[in-house]
Image: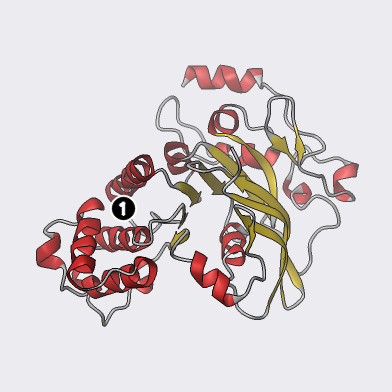
Amino acid sequence: MANLVEIRDLRVAFDGVAVLHGIGLEVAPGEALGLVGESGCGKSVTWLAALGLLPSKASIDGSVRLQGQELCNAPRSRLERVRGGRIAMIFQDPASALNPVIRVGRQLCEALRLHRGLTGAAGRAEALRLMDMVGIPDARGRFGLYPHEFSGGQCQRLMIAMALAGEPELLIADEPTTALDATIQAQILDLLARLRAETGMAVVFISHDLGAVAQVCDRVCVMYAGRIVEQGSVAQLFGHPRHPYTRGLFDAIPRLYGPRGALVPISGTVPDPRHPPPGCAFAPRCAHAHGFCATQVPRLLPQRDGRHLACAFPLPERDPQRDYEDALT
């Protein structure tokens, strides 16, 4: 089956400072792809660049194809036919994404008019259906309310409803649960999984929360300092991560079961993009780095188990000591 979206050698710079260094990834129809990594690694910038949503000072090179249609640096008219229609995006702060002085029903109806040409009674009926679909209680009675009259979780549901108004083939969820408490986070994740199953749309899930990624996604890309450093299925990365950075992300997660112990944080900080290290960007923080790592940037290469890895000295395919510790917990 042909890929829905293909990104090749995507590079982004702000005022001459490179922040993405040749991103390459694919999204298949109906697939759920996770993007994980620390803040500032380029997860959101990747998709903002793909959709032409970065400010004019950004320099963008590479290729972003939606079923063969080039989107990178495409004319505004072409992007406007794609954004909100074939590709929709929901953001981590729904309160700032909704217009505070326009009633939510009118905002939904406007999205339906722009993307599907629905107006009048037909638009209102479809807006109410979308509100019911995403779990807004008493949709008819709350159709005329303003965003501040909804809770944070309900505002996020409204944003999902607006994203679904164009019947997208791909939904990009950028940290959709960050500002929500744990119970509401679980409800939003369940909602995204259900909507994907019902509509068949593909989902790109951008998050710091590895548990949420495991719940929603089929495949995961781990990003660091503007590059993908490991890519594979959820089972591969969560079962046996091989890049030291991926391993570090898992080691920093507190365990709910088993004996208590100190967390193992990743030492150091993400490098300043204005002054990147000469070799592997993770080398200054990596306990497995050798002299090669300080001078050469590793390429993302396929491995025997099907994953892709950008590391000259990866962790072994299986870690017996780690397997033993996991068995104890």
**Which quarter of the rendered picture does the N terminus lie within?**
top right
| Residue 156 figure quarter | bottom left
Which residue was labeled with disc 1? 181
Q: Is residue 71 left or right of residue 202?
A: right
Q: In percent of the image, x 45 and y 26: which residue is there?
A: 259
Vertical order, 27 against 39 (above or below): above
| Residue 68 figure quarter | bottom right
Q: Nearer the viewer, residue 326 or 302?
A: 302
Q: Nearer the viewer, residue 23 or 209?
A: 23
Q: Is residue 327 left or right of residue 131?
A: right
Q: In percent of the image, x 70 and y 24: which residue is there?
A: 317
Q: In percent of the image, x 14 and y 67: which residue is there?
A: 142
- The amino acid at mark 1 is Asp
Tell me where residue 107 appears, x and y as whole percent: 29, 73
What is the total number of numbered labels drawn onto the structure image? 1
| Residue 153 figure quarter | bottom left
Tell me where residue 245 appears, x and y as whole percent: 67, 42
Way the structure is coloured: secondary structure
Report crowding for label 1: few under 14, some 14 to 19, many 20 or more residues within 10 A (C-alpha): few
Q: Nearer the viewer, residue 256 or 98?
A: 98
Q: Is residue 169 visible?
A: yes
Tell me where residue 200 appears, x and y as whole percent: 41, 43
Q: Is residue 272 visible?
A: no
Tell me where residue 83 appears, x and y as whole percent: 49, 66
Q: In percent of the image, x 28 and y 68: which residue is there?
A: 118
Q: Secondary structure at mark 1?
A: loop
Q: Is residue 67 left or right of residue 117?
A: right
